[in-house]
Amino acid sequence: MSKFSKNYFNTNRLPPRCIIYAGTYVPERKAWISSLFDSMERIHGRRIIYSFARKGRKRYLVVFNIYGGPAILQAIRVIAEGHCRQIFFIGSMGAKKLDVGTIVLPTTIIDKTGLVHIDSPGKSEVMAPVSINNKIREANRRLGISYAEGKIVSVPAPLHNMEHIHALKASDPKILGEEMELSTFYHFSKKDNLYAYALLYVSDNQRIHLTSNETAAKRARRSGLRAATRVALKVLP
């Protein structure tokens, strides 16, 4: 373990598996998640928040407050240096047509954040690992969780105001929506030889705004977040 990672965690050995939650950290969302574990203890962080958790005999590193490509890249590097090899990313997305709360399995991610291109000039798409996606499909089946799957665009910010990205989404019916971290997550996890899993849930669409506090929307987001967590707990070895 590097000095940097040891300084974060004050231990020589991280749990072998990690679940990363994208999005702003608020106590309500943490409560939705922590109730699915047997125990959870915050250990470090104000911007990126790291916790240790247990479920049965399994130990987890749980990461909150990941917002955008740079934050997920930082978390991946810290986790990789701590020799945690199995990482499950759970994020939210804005969908074109899917209902709020829908679980989405990403297959191809178009990078519009710029970080993948900086590391690999000319590279614009990242593929989700096929064998890992098959494990997630099987876990969804066993848990009785319905889901969509398809192409996602990773963007630099929710209010990016980049017309060419809007035009790309509108012109390609295979694109289900957009989020901010996935292309960076998959690209740099592969670079660090990590086993990278991911699921998204729809937080907003053309009918329901991201800032909506309608009871039905909040309930659907909660259901999606908890369903994705159940899959992560099922599939991580």
Image: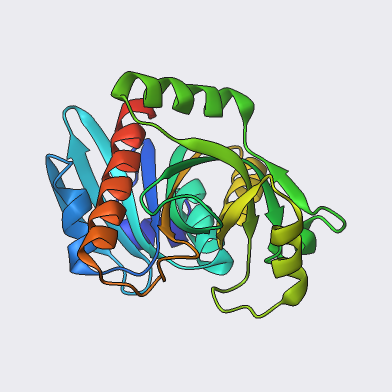
> In this view of the protein, can residue 236 be seen by the observer?
yes
Q: Nearer the viewer, residue 94 or 206?
A: 206
x, y percent for residue 102: 40, 45
Location of the C terminus (image quadrant): top left
Q: Nearer the viewer, residue 30 or 42?
A: 30
> In this view of the protein, can residue 13 be seen by the observer?
no
Task: Look at the picture and state if 84 lies above or below 66.
Answer: above
x, y percent for residue 175: 66, 50
Q: Residue at x 43, y 20 (%)?
A: 138
x, y percent for residue 48: 38, 67
x, y percent for residue 41: 17, 54
Q: Residue at x 63, y 59 (%)?
A: 154
Q: Residue at x 38, y 21 (%)?
A: 141
Point out the residue furthest to the right here.
122
To which quarter of the image does residue 190 belong?
Answer: top right
Q: Nearer the viewer, residue 133 or 150?
A: 150
Q: Is residue 61 left or right of residue 123?
A: left
Task: Look at the picture and state if 57 lies above or below 100.
Answer: above
To which quarter of the image does residue 45 belong?
Answer: bottom left
Q: Is residue 11 left or right of residue 162?
A: left
Q: Residue at x 55, y 37 (%)?
A: 149
Task: Look at the picture and state if 130 lies above or below 161.
Answer: above
Q: How is the image coloured?
A: rainbow
* Labels in figure, total: 0
